[in-house]
Image (cartoon, rainbow, N blue to C red):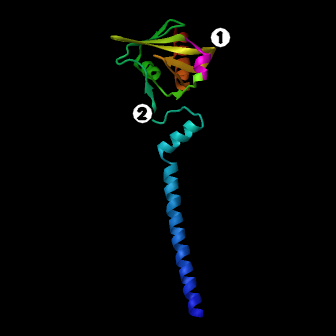
Amino acid sequence: MKSRRRTANKVSLYLQSMLMVVALFAVIALIGGFQSSNFKSQIALLLGAETPTTDKSLWKWCPPEVTEIQHLPSQTVVKDADSLKALCKVSIRPSSSEEIKKSTFVPLLRAESPGATLVVEAGVSQGISQSDLFRISGLAFHSKHLRIQLDKIFAIQSKSN
């Protein structure tokens, strides 16, 4: 009877040890998964953040070889490479069809390149500008990133004029 109990205790000890090893590997795998950039960007999107984690997550809306971007309300023109890059590559998130139906769009930016011109329109709902709703060639989207760049670049431009 004692030998059966010892055998049962040894089997129980082996099972507990194997369970602990499997649990350790599961924890290590979960920690690795949580630290991946894909997981972090998905959580950021889920929480409504729009901060791009890599340059690949940015959308380049400007025509190729853009030479200047004109801010249509102020008639200010931007030609320096850093400002063009900051305005042309933006993070975006989708807009709902209800938002688009309720909004009218007014021209905001015009990007010029040899042989191509694109116009960015800003969304306006009931006479009030929706700060991060934009449309390019019929594609409406939200972009806090673009709004921040607009505020930063054109505030600097207006101070220097």
Measure how far apart labels 1 and 2 are at the Cα level.
Answer: 35 Å
Eyeballing the image, is 34 above or below 102? below
Instruction: Please state the horizontal and vertical placement of residue 66, each as a whole percent of the image.
Output: 37, 16
Asked if residue 103 lies in the magenta stretch, the reply is: yes
Secondary structure beneath disc 1?
A: loop
Picture disc at residue 56: 2
The amino acid type, in three-letter code, at marker 2 is Lys
Eyeballing the image, is 109 above or below 5? above
Instruction: Please state the horizontal and vertical placement of residue 114, each as a whole percent of the image.
Output: 33, 11
Q: Quadrant of the N terminus?
A: bottom right
Asked if residue 41 lies in the magenta stretch, the reply is: no
The residue wearing badge 1 is 127
**63 on left or right of 29:** left
Q: Nearer the viewer, mark 1 or mark 2?
A: 1
Instruction: Please state the horizontal and vertical placement of residue 5, each as a whole percent of the image.
Output: 59, 88
- Residue drawn at point x = 45 percent, y = 19 percent: 83
Q: What is the chief secondary structure element of the magenta stretch?
A: helix
- Residue drawn at point x = 62 percent, y = 17 percent: 102
Q: Can you tell which quarter of the image residue 151 is in?
A: top right
**95 on left or right of 68:** right
Q: Nearer the viewer, residue 97 or 51?
A: 97
Circles 1 and 2: CB atoms closer than 8 Å = no
Instruction: Please state the horizontal and vertical placement of residue 72, each as a whole percent of the image.
Output: 51, 8
Question: For the residue carrying disc 2, how many other residues have a C-alpha within 10 Å: few (<14), some (14-19), or many (20+)?
Answer: few
Q: Nearer the viewer, residue 122 or 126?
A: 126
Question: For the residue carrying disc 1, how many other residues have a C-alpha within 10 Å: few (<14), some (14-19), or many (20+)?
Answer: few
Secondary structure beneath disc 2?
A: helix
The amino acid type, in three-letter code, at marker 1 is Gly
Picture disc at residue 53: none
The boundaries of the magenta stretch are 98-105
